[in-house]
Image (tube, helix red, strand yellow):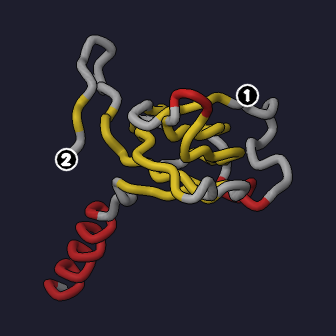
């Protein structure tokens, strides 16, 4: 009985300790699932125009079942999400976490870091992640 309790406790603690990586890379043209959201990198630019700053053209949809990940309409039953441009240092909210663009590599992928957690209270401040 005691062994069964210890085994169950170890499994529960192990499951609770799992979290997504704080750093994720999204490849151009491939839909990725990050923090329960589907993310698509349409274009990536290492140096864009006179600004010469890396940026990415993105789409994302949250609250979509994971089964839609491989579908043509990866955003689920709603309308296709609008595209937006994100520069290095800018962040996008994916569920309860803000992922900030760190780098663009070879105009083929973009790397994001989980940087802030949304506050649990409406008047709370963003919590910086370690």
Question: Is 63 rendered above or below residue 29?
Answer: above
Q: From this view, report whether residue 40 is shown above or below residue 77.
A: below
Is residue 46 shown left or right of residue 20? right
Indicate the quadrant where residue 10 lies.
bottom left
Q: What secondary structure is marked by label 1?
A: loop
Q: Which is nearer the eye, 104 or 12?
A: 104
17 on left or right of 55: left
The image quadrant that residue 5 belongs to is bottom left
Q: Residue 81, position in %: x, y? A: 73, 31
Mark 1 vs 2, N-terminal side:
1
The residue that appears at 59% across and 40% down in the rendered structure is: 56
Q: Is residue 93 above or below residue 44?
A: above
Nearest the viewer among 107 and 130 is: 107
What residue lies at 30% left-to-right and 25% top-to-bottom? 119
The numbered disc on residue 130 is: 2
- Number of the label disc, if any, that sits on residue 82: 1
Could you tell whether 102 is left or right of 130 in the image? right
Q: Circle 2 sits in a helix, a strand or a loop, which is it?
A: loop
């Amino acid at each position: 009985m005691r062994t069964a309790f210890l085994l169950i406790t170890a499994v529960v603690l192990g499951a609770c300790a799992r979290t997504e990586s704080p750093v994720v890379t999204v490849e151009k043209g491939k839909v990725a699932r990050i923090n329960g959201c589907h993310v698509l990198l349409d274009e990536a630019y290492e140096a864009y125009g006179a600004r010469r700053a890396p940026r990415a053209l993105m789409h994302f949809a949250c609250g979509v079942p994971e089964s839609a990940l491989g579908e043509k309409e990866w955003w689920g039953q709603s309308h296709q999400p609008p595209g937006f441009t994100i520069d290095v240092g800018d962040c996008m909210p994916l569920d309860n976490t803000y992922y900030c663009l760190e780098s663009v590599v070879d105009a083929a992928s973009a790397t994001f870091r989980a940087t802030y957690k949304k506050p649990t209270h409406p008047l709370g401040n963003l919590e910086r992640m370690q």
